[in-house]
Image: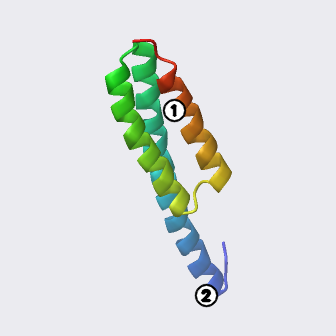
Amino acid sequence: MANIKSAKKRIKVISKKTLRNRMIKSQTKTAIKKVVVAVNAGNKEEAAAALVGAVSAIDRAYTKGIFHKNAAARKKSTLARLVNGINA
């Protein structure tokens, strides 16, 4: 455990930021999973609706600095390819 006052504060601040990042990343993963489940079920309308929410969540995570720009683009591209690949 830290003894210096500023180090103690940094520990508190970092734990708050870590919790916030974990929450946002979890919400993003849930949105992505909804798209994958809809694609596996073959439901194109539901998958398209879930894709909009997932893209929004990924963009939100990118603007908050949780995902790198290229990682966010890769995730969105992969999901779009999945949804467009449904034959319905």
Residue shown at 57% from the left, 81% from the top: 9
Please say if 85 is above or below 13.
Answer: above
Can you give x and y, in whole percent of width and height, for residue 72 in the image?
59, 48
In the picture, the disc for residue 5 is: 2
Residue shown at 47% from the left, 25% from the top: 83
The image quadrant that residue 44 belongs to is top left
Residue shown at 43% from the left, 41% from the top: 54
In the picture, the disc for residue 80 is: 1
Q: Secondary structure at mark 1?
A: helix
Q: Amino acid at mark 2?
A: Lys
Q: Is residue 17 left or right of residue 71?
A: left
The image quadrant that residue 78 belongs to is top right
Looking at the image, what colour scheme do you see?
rainbow
Residue placed most toward the observer, 12 or 85: 85
In the picture, the disc for residue 23 is: none
Q: Between disc 1 and disc 2, whose residue precedes? A: 2
